[in-house]
Image (spheres, rainbow, N blue to C red):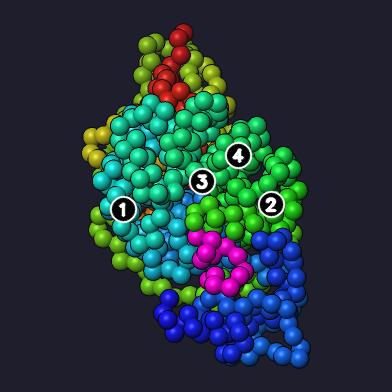
Amino acid sequence: MKTENLALIMNIARGKAPADLLIRNARVVNVFTKQIEEMEVAVGAGTIAWVGKPDPDKPRPAKAVYDAGGKYLIPGLIDAHCHIEMSFMSPIPFVKTILSHGTTAAVLDMHDVCNAGIECMHSFAWELAQTPLNVILMIPPCIPGTPTLEEAGAEMTLKDVQDAMRLPNAWGIAETMDFNRVLDQEPEIMSILAWGREQNLRIDGHCPELVGDDLQAYIAAGILTDHESVSLPEMLEKYRLGMKVILRRGSLQEPVRAGDLVAALPDTTNLLLSTDGCIFLDDILDKGHMNKALQAIVAEGVDPVTAIQMATINVARAYGVDHHIGSIAPGRRADLVVVSDLQNFEVEAVFLGGKKFDPEAYSIPPYNHQPEVLNTVKMGKVSPETFQIKTPITSGEVKVRVMTIIAGTVATREEHESLPVKDGLLQPDVSRDLLKVAVFDRYREGGYHALGIVRGFGIKKGAFGGSVGQDSQNLVVVGSSDEDMALVVNTIREMQGGIVFAVDGQVVVKVSLPIAGIMSNIEPRELQRQFRELHQKLWEMGSKQDNPSFDLSLLLTCAVIPELKITNRGLVDALSGQFVPLLLEQ
């Protein structure tokens, strides 16, 4: 801050200079004391200068006044853990959308985009830097997420992490998601963690169902947070051991009621709130972002002010930025949100650095990405024969492992089913919703690919696929027709990234995602229209999912989330981190 601006805000605080903005008639939520009082807030040079009770005999001088009309004034909301890429929007349109809902800061994990290439991650960070969002950027250490189980478009080393820490807004090390690598003391990940500790960096975690001595060893490596707990006892154990426990609320069902967790804790300082990026594009546009997350946990029994703390000051403290954001207090950035009430959190106005945010005036030119960011699908063409699954018998039935989607969650379940064999080839069974699934290494010609069986997509004909398979962002396709599966894969290859649905040899709908093969920079409403058209066609063909594209991206290929997954190398038991065969002993 310039000296003259520092002097200005001090003079505004003393009433010796007019505020750039005075917010009046507001019920201010104090995240330090948990009190709500009618107050005025004076802003200068983008910073909160003064917060106090109005004095009718001595009104504060101001160049501009905003009357909050008795509504609630809360700090700008902070998403404690977010993956932008899961919205399929690139940073500039994404930021425009979430600012409208009161999210003014986010802890952003670049894990997804980095899997498409280190140059993609760098481009992503520079695009983010063009936006007004307060960015706490975390550098991914686990690329690929499970290097012994899959290929990706990059392999992050200690040097890569060190180089990336020079990117704008870089703040710490992102989720250390392959906890088995940490527990096995794999040299590369250990060197990254040791360096992070030497540099006093925040290090995020990802450790579902990790408890006991293994959990303590994981935390001892310097890991600060976790957002993947699946039970209340697991959350409480992590909290007692000093972890910042992050609750996720978005578009998915979550395993623990927020009110139960809060009721079990004598103090909630280390309890944070996030979307984890697990929020559908439709929901962001039509329902909200972090304000929707607040609404959810209040409905689950959390006191509204405690909920606000979880989305503001608790996050700011966890990441060491509470002197800058996270509260309504002198010296903090004037990121403020006016909400209608403390149950629905409907946003009435958003102030960024003391300026009222107008989405209609939000105009940032599209970022000029380099060719390597727009050409990430390098695999060769495929044929229908690529999707044949050979069996040891020529006819009859064989028993196979089936990856079954658990609706509304990010998990899958392993089930066993018998499928028919014809001419030595395994056949899908549409009547039982047993479809083929294939995953390809899209980053190199001649790379590995794997085949499996999935239940839960429900489509009666055709094939559905995309270059969006988490975490490596490999190309994943589901279908009942080998010909249509080949058409989908080859179309995505020609598009250089996207999601495609094909039936009877014809492409029905395609959505282009040219940025790293996983994002689009078109207007959010147009992207929403395209996805709605795609999903409508899938529903007409029998799909059972609320959001088939999200499920395609997240549920099948993420080998660190239980139970059975598939990568370009094969079927994986996510808990043991071991490959398992598709065909069972007959």
Q: Looking at the image, tell me whether mark 1 or mark 3 is earlier in sequence order.
A: 1
Residue type of the residue flagged with mark 3? Phe
Residue type of the residue flagged with mark 1? Ala
Per the model, the C-alpha gap separating discs 1 and 3 is 28 Å
> Where in the figure is residue 250, as x and y percent of width and height?
60, 50
Residue that badge 3 annotates: 550
Residue that badge 1 annotates: 164
Q: Can you tell which mark lies on residue 239?
A: 4
Of the residues tagged 1 and 4, which is closer to the observer? 4
Q: Looking at the image, tell me whether mark 2 or mark 4 is earlier in sequence order.
A: 4
Estimate how packed mark 2 is, as few (under 14), some (14 to 19) or many (20 or more) residues with alpha carbons within 10 Å. some
Of the residues tagged 2 and 3, which is closer to the observer? 2
Estimate how packed mark 1 is, as few (under 14), some (14 to 19) or many (20 or more) residues with alpha carbons within 10 Å. many
Residue that badge 2 annotates: 296
Q: Looking at the image, tell me whether mark 1 or mark 2 is earlier in sequence order.
A: 1
Q: Looking at the image, tell me whether mark 3 or mark 4 is earlier in sequence order.
A: 4
